[in-house]
Image (spheres, rainbow, N blue to C red):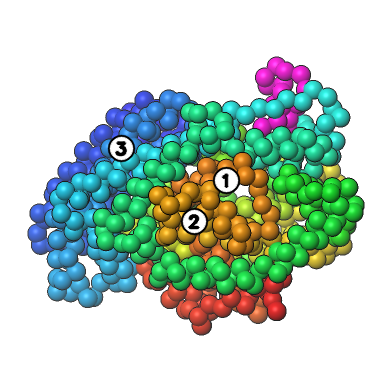
Amino acid sequence: MTNPLLDFSGLPKFDAIRPEHVTPAIDALLAQAEAAVKHAETVSPVTWESFVVPLEDATEKLWRAWGQVGHLQGTMNTPALRQAYNDNLPKVTRFSSALGQNLALFAQYRALAEASGTQDLDPARARSLDNALRDFRLGGAELPDEAKARFAAVREELASLSAKFSDNVLDATDEYEFWIKDKQHLAGLPADVVSACRAAAKEDDQPGWKFTLQMPCYLPVQTYAEDRALRETLYRASGVRASETGDEKFDNTPLIARILALRTELAQLLGFASYAEYSLATKMARSPQEVLDFLRDLAGRALPYARQDRAELEAFARDTLGLDTLEPWDLAYASEKLKQARYSFSAQEVKQYFTEPKVLAGLFGVIKALYGLDVVADQAPVWHPDVRFYRLQDATGRLVGQFYLDLYAREGKRAGAWMDDCRNRRHRADGQQQTPLVYLVCNFGKGVDGAPATFTHNDVITLFHEMGHGLHQLLTEVGELSVAGINGVEWDAVELPSQFMENFCWEWERLQEMTAHVETGEPLPRALYDRMIAARNFQSGMFTVRQLEFALFDMELHSRFDPAQDSVMALLERVRDEVAVNRPPSWHRFPHQFSHIFAGGYAAGYYSYKWAEVLSADAYAAFEEAPDQLAATGARFRAEVLSRGGSRGALENFTAFRGRAPSIDALLRHSGMAA
């Protein structure tokens, strides 16, 4: 019990976990899990209580401890921790592969499915059992021994390569520094960004201003810097990260080729024609062609709007900004200037109203209005002083779940925003109810010199998005681990609750509650709000085709790509020929930074953002149709979608809530692309 990773008595001891704890803890938990597997292989008679529960008891401890290590790897990456993680990753992956290929366990699950009385299992257990049998087949349990060994080796190597891909992006991002000594190059940049760059320089005992590729620095430069050379410098540095252009040790080129080859081999070992077919076996979409048809249908609707957006931007840049050629590093800058000219406001102006305390209060107010639940500050050991901790409770004070909130960008922290579960809801064998515990992680700019952080409206949308994922996990009422929260939910429906929450960032009443000007304390003025709403779908065509570009590239890459006849960059250029209106330069290396598909869970699944957006827009339309029944509609959404987790199919959940199948009409209307 001196090892904090072996202490499951309460909340994780993040303030005590050290790299040297990782290996002994994982070795001990692997031994316990392997012993439990051995026992489960021969237990008789096979019942849920005698077989499934003790097996889950042992394996859950392993996954919880390993999840804590992985979380620290993503938020507090150090050389020692990275070494400990990479040392143990093969062992954990081997155990996971062996578990998925264990014929004795597979036979036990089949015996359980065939046992008398199994038909009387509650829906969560029945779904969990069906998923287990499917996952054994997808895990290679039915393969011959030689193929089974190869399958396990492929999975192990893929896990290692994905971790290395992510590390390379992180290291290439963190390593870059650009120094400015002359203040004239800072023209146009927001004051808080200039202050943060100056503070970064002071930390290094240097004069001037330090610029990095961290998003709180990079995005404002692209959007506001009047110095075109500065925009280009950072754009180029960002565009070639983790590629052959930069430091060889961070080059993801060989990793991409190897990952794709191994994924193809893995799929073919199981009899699938492509990795995309293998990936879709656990998703709502039935085939790669169905996904490609969906994406191209949406592209056909969006492209006329995207081309109009591009033509307007080019004309404005030429006639007003004097930019005869609109370069990629001009896009965000010119777009912001056009938005200011057309709608008389800027994102920076709006940002002054979104102070962190008010945004959080507003977010928690939405949760209260929708679900009658209170978010209350709580105490827990944390991995960084900036991390906060909260509890979600009902009107009686009963604990529903808890979550960590890690808002700010810093070195050693993976870019982007995400939710992950630390501990899932579960009915324990001792009769106790285990409550869910989740991480919510963002990469926003931090307040400087004691001032509160201010967020762009896009930051606010990101925060609401991740909270939507968190609520999906926190509000589950399922007691079986494998289908509680987002577990067992089809991947292309996972984004429904997150994208649904984004809509509340546009409601006037909500914005009144979550805004207070950083200097005056005044809420967002109605006139400014009206201009925001008018600009809501500004360049939505360009944004849509950009997402479709990523999704089509991903699906084509994992369904039809032949490395013997093609290159990854050539495929991407063909996709851009089809749907893009903004083309990066030939030297840009987007795939080398596409962690979603090479280091995350979105391989042959990036389309799910748009797929789920259809569901989320249609779900929110139910609230629009009954504006005076917010609590009642929220209760129904919670009961039919959020609380169900993966215990019921996502389409069945949606239809139970909406009373019909989903329609694309709401998405097109919300995006300003309705006919």
Helix, strand or loop at mark 2: helix
Residue 464 among those drawn in magenta: no
The correct choice, above or below, for 304 with respect to 253 in the image is below
Q: Residue furthest bottom?
A: 660
The correct choice, above or below, for 70 with respect to 565 in the image is above
- Find disc 1 in the rendering and name its residue: 590
Q: In the rendered structure, which amino acid carries the disc numbered 1?
A: Phe
Q: Nearer the viewer, residue 322 or 48?
A: 322
Q: Which residues are magenta?
A: 196-212
Q: Residue furthest front?
A: 565
Cα distance in 3D space between marks 1 and 3: 28 Å
Q: In the rendered structure, which amino acid carries the disc numbered 3?
A: Pro
In the figure, is residue 134 to the left or right of 395? left
Q: Nearer the viewer, residue 131 or 304?
A: 304
Cα distance in 3D space between marks 2 and 3: 26 Å
Single out the mark in the foreground, 2 or 3: 2
Q: How many marks?
A: 3
- Find disc 2 in the rendering and name its residue: 554
* Residue drawn 53% across the image and 51% down it: 570
